[in-house]
Image: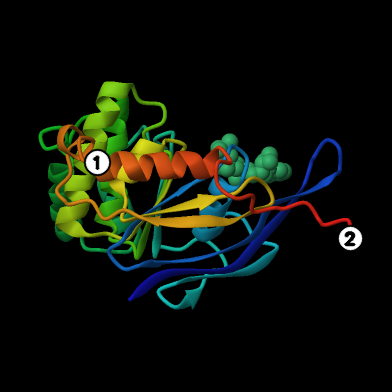
Amino acid sequence: MTALEISGLSKDYVDAYTGEEITAIGDVSFTVDRGEFVSILGPSGCGKTTVLNIIAGFVKQTGGTVKVGGRVVDGPGPDRGVVFQSHALFPWKTVLGNAAFGLRMKRVPPKQREATAREYLELVGLAGFEHKYPHELSGGMQQRLGVARVLANEPDVMLMDEPFASIDAQTRRKLQEDLTRVFELRRPTVFFVTHDIDEAVFLSDRVIVLSTRPSIVREIVTVDLPRPRTWRETTQLPEFRHLSNRITELLTGGAEDVHPAIDPD
Ligand SMILES: Nc1ncnc2c1ncn2[C@@H]1O[C@H](COP(=O)(O)OP(=O)(O)OP(=O)(O)O)[C@@H](O)[C@H]1O
């Protein structure tokens, strides 16, 4: 079943300083199935975050449609949950209060929301930290809380914008493994923006590779690697290296040009 459907998406921006119009997204279409993990990769400035912001309903597209669960998106809504690169937590709320926040907004009764929030905190490895405040947590733990907070809401689609980019390399590896474990247990639908090819291959069922601006879908690469995945085992699989090399080739222009110059004849 399709959870997310993007058809003919385009986005023009007007540069605030020069007044010049730029087309960030040319024409992008793809779907994400329920319970599928899909990442999007592309050269810097090709519009990955813009695609996510349009799906989230934070930014209005110039053309095309976005449907979540068959409904057309025309603003933010509880059917979509966003994990940002910066943790975007409420500093005045405890870990438990942060994790339960969305459920409170949905008017879930207190006992039930606490139980659900605790369940997801445990799932991301934050059991025992319920009564701490965000500033008492490390960056990695704050990001785990960001993930738990969105998961607790059980959105139709979980949107993640480079959630581990500002975390040190070793912690990042651990968070990526934990995310695959949580994904395998709960099977949320995930749309994940990243710059990191290995991260995209390691986490995903499919990877959407965009071209340079104005972006179009260059290729959608299926990642048929066994789960559960660990960095140690998964990266040793020849198929992992093959997929990673294929995507590198697509991003560095080794493959056929998707924006060929107009033939002068
Ligand atoms: N609010 C805005 N106003 C004007 N231009 C914008 C705005 N937001 C993004 N852009 C431009 O649109 C293009 C796409 O930006 P976006 O951040 O979506 O790309 P990205 O692929 O996520 O980039 P990166 O890989 O560098 O994070 C860029 O050229 C950017 O400068």
Q: Is residue 89 visible?
A: no
109 and 42: which one is in front? 42
* Distance from mark 1 CB to nearest ligand 1 atom below 8 Å: no
174 lies left or right of 72: left
Mark 1 lies on a secondary structure that is helix
Determine which of the numbered discs, if any, sits on residue 94 in the image: none
Mark 1: few/some/many CA within 10 Å (<14, 14-19, 20+): few
In the picture, the quarter occupied by the C terminus is bottom right
Figure quadrant of residue 19: top right
Q: Quadrant of the N terminus?
A: bottom left
Residue linked to disc 1: 238
Q: Say what amino acid the circle numbered 1 marks.
A: Pro
CA gap, disc 2 to disc 1?
Answer: 45 Å
Residue 191: where, in percent of width, then height?
Answer: 40, 54
Numbered disc 2: secondary structure: loop
Q: Residue at x 64, y 45 (%)?
A: 212
- The one of 80 and 179 positioned closer to us in this rendering: 179
In this rendering, does residue 209 appear at all? yes
The mark nearer the N terminus, 2 or 1, is: 1
Residue 185 coordinates in the image, percent (x, y): 14, 55
Q: Which residue occupies the foreground of this view, 239 or 161?
A: 239
Q: Residue at x 37, y 73 (%)?
A: 2
The residue at which mark 2 appears reads as: 265
Report x, y in % for residue 149: 29, 47
> 171 left or right of 195?
left
Relative side of 117 to 88, left or right: left
Circle 2: residue type = Asp
Residue at horizontal 26%, vertical 25%?
171
- Name which residue lies at 33% across and 21% down: 168
Q: How many marks?
A: 2
